[in-house]
Every structure is written in structure tokens, then in C-alpha cells.
Image (tube, rainbow, N blue to C red):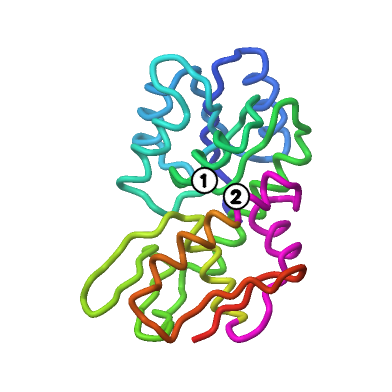
Amino acid sequence: MSKIKVLLAEDEASLGMIVRESLESRDFIVDHAENGEQALDLYKTNQPDILVLDVMMPKKDGFTLAKEIRESNKNIPIIFLTAKSQTSDVLEGFNLGGNDYLKKPFSMEELIVRIKALLNRIELKTNLELIKIGNYIFNFTKQTLEFENLKENLTHREAELLFHLQQNKNQVLDRTFILNKLWGNDDFFNARSMDVFISKLRKKLKKDENIQILNIRGFGYKLIC
């Protein structure tokens, strides 16, 4: 099995060194950048498997870096490291294509678990066929929804959520289960975030009147199609 290549972008030198050495001691290959511009150069040169990006960095912040990378690569997993805890900051990270976030300070064990979980999810889904949802065609790998030759791009978070709704269509998708699986825990901020993403998916699926995403209060959501 090939080693996992991690691009770590962290401007705090001591923290960056600790994370890099900890990951390398567990058989990861790590490139460490201390600013966003250096991270972008390393990304283009070394083709990592996953990105771990500090939000606040000089020259180019983590959100800007993620947005630029997502323009050419919609599938590479991105974990944000942040001292911010406001809902708006978390939502911005997910809207820009982030898959997960860790609040500082964090444990190395938690970071490693999240890295492996994200890579496992990507690997399981890369060979999926096109999925029909009502009159829509959903391509998880390319993160697109197509309706009568009109194609719309999804964020990675939207694609993940829609995939799980579709896998459980006409059944209740447990709210706690999906929060823990996609967001890492079921706290208030993550629950608010998921509600926002459900609303976005409803809008993107509204061209087919036979598709509904129902809120089953106290339990979760149900995709009917």
C-alpha cells in the first residue's frame, strides 16, 4: 500500500513542525508550507492525496487557497485548521469545498482519524456509475447535477450529502448519523450547517416536482423521488 501524501499549510512554524514530524512518524509523506503561495506551488508540484490547510496564513489564506485549488480539482479532500468557531466561518469553509475542519488545539490522533476517514470515503466512491434521481443525473465523482442537458456543479459537501440521501431514498436518513459521518460530530453549529446544505439541495432539485427532501422532525431527512 502506497504512503499517504499530505500537504500541510501552517504558518506557525513550531506547530507545523510538530504536525509534520508526528505524521511522518506514522508513515505519512508530508510537505509543509508556511504560507498560502508556497502551499499552492507544492500542490502543483507534488500532487498530494489530501490537504490540511490553516485558515489564517500570510500571502494567501486557507479559504482563498482552497477556492483556487477547487477550480481545477473538485475531489481532493481538504481539512481546515482553524481557531475560529463562528458558524459563518465554518459554513464558508464548507461552501468553498472543504470536507472537514479541526479547531485548534487538536490532537494528532483526531487529525489522523479524519485524514483516513476522508480518503476512505473518496476511494469508495470514485468508481460510482451515474446515479439517476428523478429526472436528474447525479455524478458524484464530478460533483455535478444534470437536468435536461443543463449541468450544475455541486460543492463536495453537497455531493456527499446528496449521495447519502440517495442511498437511503424514501427512507429516513438519521440526522445524528449523517452529522457524525460528514461533519465529525452532531453539535449545534454542525446541525445548523447541515440545515443550510439541505436548503441548497432543495433549490438545486426543484426542477423536478416529484422530488422532495422532507424534514422528519426529531429524526432526520427523507429524499422522496
Q: Residue at x 66, y 13 (%)?
A: 14
Q: Is residue 183 above or below residue 101?
A: below
Viewer-nearest residue: 22 or 166: 166
Disc 1 on helix, strand or loop? helix
In this rendering, would 191 be left or right of 127? right
Q: Is residue 223 above or below residue 110?
A: below
Say what amino acid the circle numbered 1 marks.
Phe
Across and down, in percent, residue 158 comes to 48, 60
The circle on residue 210 is none
Give the image quarter of residue 39. Answer: top left
Disc 2 on helix, strand or loop? helix
Viewer-nearest residue: 4 or 117: 117
Q: Residue at x 64, y 46 (%)?
A: 115
Q: Kindly report the distance in space between the C-alpha atoms of the residues bearing marks 2 and 1.
A: 9 Å
Q: Residue at x 54, y 54 (%)?
A: 196
Give the image quarter of residue 182. Answer: bottom right
Q: Which residue is mark 2?
A: 193
Specify the segment rendered in magenta. Answer: 169-194
In this rendering, would 189 be left or right of 156? right
Say what amino acid the circle numbered 2 marks.
Ser
- 2 and 1 marks in contact (CB < 8 Å): yes
Across and down, in percent, residue 80 comes to 57, 36
In this rendering, would 20 be left or right of 40? right
The circle on residue 94 is 1
How many residues crowd mark 2 within 10 Å: few (<14), some (14–19), many (20+)?
some
Q: In what quadrant of the picture does the N terminus appear? A: bottom right
Across and down, in percent, residue 106 comes to 75, 31
Magenta: main secondary structure equals helix
